[in-house]
Image (cartoon, grey):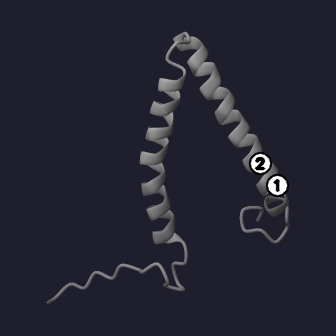
Amino acid sequence: MRHFIWVPGPTDRNFPYVLSGRLALGALIPFMLLFVSGLDQVLSRLDLRLKYYILAALNLMMLIAEFATNHRAFSDRYNWYHM
């Protein structure tokens, strides 16, 4: 008996974002490592505690921007996450 393993492609209608999201996440991780190492080089003269405060402030600004962008979609009563 042969086993057939079916992997959905990026244009498959049954799994529209499964593979694309994984590819985007795979590209995001090296980009974020480069971003953080570049930020460390730029802030090399500062104290370690201040570097973490700046990184936390950047993360907080990104989180606020995401909430501001997605608030309208997530508060919609027809959104899947809301149900």
Q: Which residue is mark 2?
A: 67
Q: Nearer the viewer, residue 78 or 47?
A: 47
Q: Which residue is mark 1?
A: 71
Looking at the image, is 68 positioned above or below residue 59? below
**Which residue shows up at 49% across the image and 85% down it?**
12
What type is the residue that disc 2 sits on? Phe
Quarter of the image where one finds residue 22: bottom left
Q: Can you say which quadrant of the picture contains the C terminus? A: bottom right
**Which residue shows up at 49% across the image and 17% down it?**
44
- Residue 4: x and y in percent read 25, 85
- Residue 64: x and y in percent read 76, 41
CB under 8 Å between discs 1 and 2: yes
- Residue 34: x and y in percent read 44, 39
Question: Residue 29 shows which numbered tag?
Answer: none
Determine the CA span between mark 1 and mark 2.
5 Å
Looking at the image, is 43 positioned above or below residue 47? below
Q: Nearer the viewer, residue 9 or 45?
A: 45
Secondary structure under badge 1?
A: helix
Around disc 1, counting alpha carbons within 10 Å, would you say few (fewer than 14), some (14 to 19), or many (20 or more)?
few
Q: Can you say which quadrant of the picture contains the N terminus? A: bottom left
Looking at the image, is 15 positioned above or below residue 62? below
Secondary structure under badge 2?
A: helix
Most extreme residue toward the bottom is: 1
Around disc 2, counting alpha carbons within 10 Å, would you say few (fewer than 14), some (14 to 19), or many (20 or more)?
few
Left or right, 49 with respect to 71, comes to left
**Which residue shows up at 28% across the image and 81% down it?**
5
What type is the residue that disc 1 sits on? His
Quarter of the image where one finds residue 50: top right
Q: Nearer the viewer, residue 13 or 82?
A: 13
